[in-house]
Image: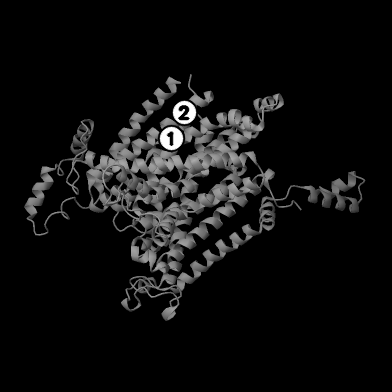
Amino acid sequence: MEENFNKHSNISAADLDRLNKEANEEATPSSAKIIWNEFRADKPALIALIIVVGFIAFVMIASLFIDTPKMMQTNLMNYNISPGTNGYILGADAAGRSIAQQIIVGSRNSIGIAIGLTIISSTFGICWGLISGYYSGYIDWGMQRVYDFMMMLPMTMMIIVLVTIIKNYNAISLTLIFSIFYWEGTSRLIRSRTLSESEKDYVAASKTSGTSSLKIIFKEIMPNISSLIIVDTTLSFAENIGVETGLSYLGFGLPIQTPSLGTLIANANDPNNITEYWWTWLPAAALIITLCLSISYIGQVLRRSADATQRQGAAD
Amino acid sequence: MWKTVLRRVLIMIPEVIILSLLVFLLAKAMPGDPFTGSINPKADPAQLHHLMEMNGLYDPWYQQYWNWVVHLFQGNLGNSYQYQEPVTRLIGSRAINTVWLALLTTFLTYCFALPMGMFAAKHEGKLPDTIIRFYTYITYSIPFFVVLVIGIWIFGYVLGWFPTTGSVSATAASGLPTYGSHLYHIILPSVLGALFGTVNVVQYLRSEVIDAKRSDYVRTARSKGVPEKEIYKHHIFRNSLLPIAAFAGYSITGLLNGSIFTETVFSYPGMGLLFINSINYRDYTVITALVLIYGILNLLGTLLSDIILSIVDPRIRIE
């Protein structure tokens, strides 16, 4: 090809090189580059990214060195000792269990469930939205009725009822229960974007040339809305941390012997703890706030980089 | 217009039937029975058996469901096993508390959100807009139950400005002081709910107003020489407000879900706290009634919003 090109053109090799370089400079940067530029332009976003990634890596590794059953053993000698005594960095709760260790293991559990929930519910929601938005007519109508019905269900109540029904539930069954109820937001967003995307020319062209519907949906429409999917998944990850910890706070999330950030905050239900022994719950609350703020800030930055009119990063 | 409403209502009927069936079966599937814990542990098993039989708990499930539905239409939701009083009366007394809390929260949410949305749109892209956007980002990101816990800690315990449990002070004299005490108990939860629940209304109003700012009728008004203040008051705000009103219906869902957390944190005797207690005591009749009521309220909220929207926006009507 290149030989052929050289034979029929009178552009010198040096010129061709220069033109190539210019074309590369003028071309739209790749999406990874855009996102990176955006993070570089926005220092708080970079800090948020470092906090989230660093913290997740830290709890995943640190929790490997903590013996959970031993950690959850009652030790009355250390009843509510304050931070810094007996080598307990963040003190201990009413059963003498180290708060720092519980926070590490609890964060791992909470983040793990949030990741699992995000993956399952987003995948399901994306597929649902794509299919419902692409096939208009009866399929869409039927899927919309199921969606309406799910929206009507009082979510928190249904989750609590299901959790009480299932005996010996664990992190996995809990994640699955949450997933039943948390795909609607994603599916609705994806459906409305798919609806408008399906009317575009490239879809019509693909249809007339006989491409199968599944291929159009997943190979053609989905890549075109991928930025929306990335943003939505990040934001739902932040939200899902709140879902699990909230239910654990009420006492219907992870079982008592499995610490979660929510069960730690539930220590605040005791009027003694909330005022005198603040270290039993406040660090966990502060941690949740930091995590959720950081993750949704990252989501905001991703959203900005997906929308060319809002970018702050220079396109250099 | 009426066609849209009628069709919406017709679709609701099968939804409610499926919900009632689902709720009933789920409640039946819950482990344990309502009597074992509540009667004397030394009681004769035969007596327990008799109690179960008396309450029809040994009948096949469809028989029980049918009895339940028939009673439902007679306005009889059964008796609470835990509180030993009719469920309708029990829920009625709690519902009032939840409704007051929800009304005050909604009212305050609009009080905070409408000026913020207008202000942000008026100064689009400038400092106030950035600040308000930052505020909505923070309030949207933090899980609400954490806000409640920290709120009750700071304002309830540390500063001692607000009561931390109950819905009314036991020592308040009847009449006006009771209402005052009642209001005093719901101020903190509803202010927190309103401060952290503005994001939808603010963002929606902001984009509505920004759209309206660029529309032809505003340009005409401006070129006629109508003062800027009048334009905002009479032209933009009026037009942007109606779609916002539609949000009131949708927000019911959020408020109901939130009521479980709010009422648990503040030990506020409303429907949400009643639900948590009933779950712990396996009080089936109350659980099924509450889930059904919450589901139907969600439906009515969406219906209300859709009706308002179809009045405002003729494009979504069915002709």
Pinpoint residue A35: horizontal percent, then vertical percent: 66, 53
Q: In this rendering, is residue B159 above or below A191? A: below
Q: Are marks 2 and 1 on the same chain?
A: yes
Q: Amino acid at mark 2?
A: Ile
Using residue B53 as the reference point, say whether residue B93 is left or right of it. right
Task: Please report the residue visible at 58 percent of the width from the left and 38 percent of the height from the top.
Answer: B118
Give the residue furthest to the bottom. Answer: A86
Task: Please report the residue visible at 24 percent of the width from the left and 44 percent of the height from the top.
Answer: B286
Q: Residues within 10 Å of mark 1 (few under 14, many from 20)?
A: many
Pinpoint residue B6: horizontal percent, then vertical percent: 39, 23
Q: Amino acid at mark 1?
A: Gly
Task: Please report the residue visible at 28 percent of the width from the left and 45 percent of the height from the top.
Answer: B26
Residue A189 appears in the figure: no
Circle 1 SS class: helix
Callout 2 touching callout 1 (CB < 8 Å): yes
Pinpoint residue B228: horizontal percent, then vertical percent: 66, 32
Q: In this rendering, is residue B215 above or below B166? A: above
In terms of depth relative to the viewer, which is nearer, A11 or B83? B83
Q: Residues within 10 Å of mark 2 (few under 14, many from 20)?
A: some
Would you name the residue on which mark 1 appears? B249
Task: Please report the residue visible at 74 percent of the width from the left and 52 percent of the height from the top.
Answer: A314
* Disc 2: host chain: B
Q: Which scheme is used to colour this image of the protein? A: one colour
Would you name the residue on which mark 2 appears? B308
How many labels were placed on the picture?
A: 2
* Disc 1: host chain: B
Q: Earlier in the sequence, mark 2 or mark 1?
A: 1
Pinpoint residue A233: horizontal percent, then vertical percent: 53, 50
Circle 2 SS class: helix
